[in-house]
Image (tube, rainbow, N blue to C red):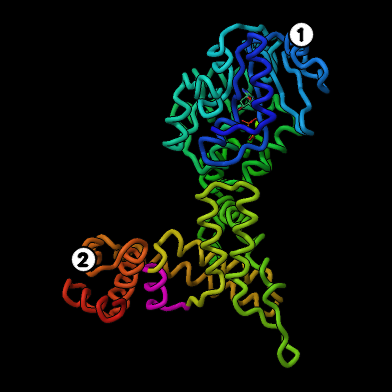
Amino acid sequence: MRLPEYVCEILDKLRNSGYEAYCVGGCVRDYLLGQCPDDYDVTTSALPEQIMKVFDGYKLLTVGLKHGTVTVIINRKTVEITTYRIDGNYTDHRHPSEVRFTPCLKEDLARRDLTINAMAYSPEKGIIDPFGGREDLKSGIIRCVGDPMKRFDEDGLRILRALRFASRYGFRIDKNTSDAIHRLRYLLSFISAERINFELCGILTGNCGDILYNYSDVICEIIPEMYPCVGFEQHSKYHNKTVYGHIVATVVARLTMLLHDIGKPASFFMKDGVGHFYGHADVSCEIAAKIIERLRFSNKIADEVLFLIKNHGIVINDDTRSIRRGLARYGAERFLKLIRVHYYDTCGKSPEYFGEKDLFGSIEEHTKEYLENEPPMSLKQLKVSGSDISELGITGKKIGEALSFLLEQVVNGNCENDKDSLLALIENNYL
Ligand code: ATP
Ligand code: MG
């Protein structure tokens, strides 16, 4: 882990004064995820007065002193340095009534909310990970440190933090942690509106589909007006989902929709008094890729959103051939999302084009029917494999492209699914 100079300076100064000092929490997690941390928190065995002495001459903020935190301003950045601490009893399901300092790093890590947030790092000692945070990061699991029932009961905000991190990284929530979230969701009534606002926005800007579906009870706890929507059947030809299901489906695509036409100004030209935007989907995709990287969305979200933006203008017709081709090319899940994106796109058009909404509603319905009756063919069923392709001298990414090409040809009825015909097709088209 490469730390910025100013962070090294802080760790070095503490260590040279005889104290232990580690980076901790979010910065270690982000680093292990391959993302550049926004800020660095430091945890140390030095007591608050000792921290202040070590950083004598630096600009310090001491608002958090009661909880053991001294903020050092260094190179115009702020770094919070907090003494190893154990939280005392929680009396209001949010704040410990007192904190106790401890000389033991592991005790400090044990008070933290999630295993992925309970790791420390120093250049000398490497990563300290007593609760399996690294493993959980690798497997994409959100899990409380210790007993989830106890940890949420101490501080109800952790329920929303767990959902926020699950959404941000597209992780799933461990069973015990998830059970405790459902059981203790009433504790959210102890959390301030400002904190709920912050966490809710965090949830909504991540990969929130599964979270919103699976934790509708938590959402209703903070927005009780939502209760009637959950499970509410619409009995309308425009809808195949409950009201809540529809709400969730639209919310999920918001990042895509926010960025899908961002390349239009750059692709605009006028011909005979009419504006054109040829190639704008690709331009939008390029611009969006930079934004998504800058705002540190996970790779999973980046992949999906960029795919949807790039393909948001492709032609999809309401016939079996077009549906079959879409399914073969993109896979069922992505193709259905792409249809949704087309649908939302028409929602923002001039009212005379609203009719297209029905078209995409109908394509979605027919696609689902098709999937029920005929599960789509997958690459696995293709009678040639990657190694067959590579024997023809095709390498790397091109192998996957060749297989997808073949699958599409078979699905479209242009080629028999037998090895000789498929290999011949590749030889004629690729070599
Ligand atoms: P972000 O990237 O959102 O800032 P973060 O993990 O840095 O993520 P912070 O709110 O800055 O989150 O908190 C820093 C660390 O403090 C967390 O990583 C976690 O170890 C601990 N922490 C924060 N809030 C809680 C809480 N409510 N209960 C227990 N530990 C917490
Ligand atoms: Mg942070």
Residue 203: image quadrant is: top right
Task: From the top left corner, tell me how far across and down residue 61 is, in percent.
Answer: 82, 21
Kindly identify the residue that appears in the image at 77 percent across and 10 percent down: 53
Kindly identify the residue that appears in the image at 22 percent across and 74 percent down: 422
> Which of disc 1 and disc 2 is earlier in sequence?
1
Q: Nearer the viewer, residue 327 or 33?
A: 33
Residue 254: tell me if it is visible: no
Q: Nearer the viewer, residue 62 or 310?
A: 62
Labelled disc at residue 280: none
Q: Which residue is mark 1?
A: 49
Left or right: 126 as drawn, with respect to 294 = left
Query: Which quarter of the frame holds ligand 1?
Result: top right
Task: From the top left corner, tell me how far across and down residue 357 is, in percent.
Answer: 59, 72
| Alpha carbons under labels 2 and 1: distance apart | 69 Å
Task: From the top left corner, tell me how far across and down residue 54 is, in percent.
Answer: 74, 13
Q: Which residues are magenta?
A: 317-328
324 magenta-colored: yes
| Amino acid type at image mark 1 | Glu
Q: Secondary structure at mark 2?
A: helix
Q: Secondary structure at mark 1?
A: helix
Kindly identify the residue that appears in the image at 61 percent across and 46 percent down: 296
Tell me the chief SS of the magenta region: helix
Residue 396: tell me if it is visible: yes
**Rendered-image quadrant of the N terminus:** top right
Residue 261: image quadrant is: bottom right
Labelled disc at residue 391: 2
410 magenta-colored: no
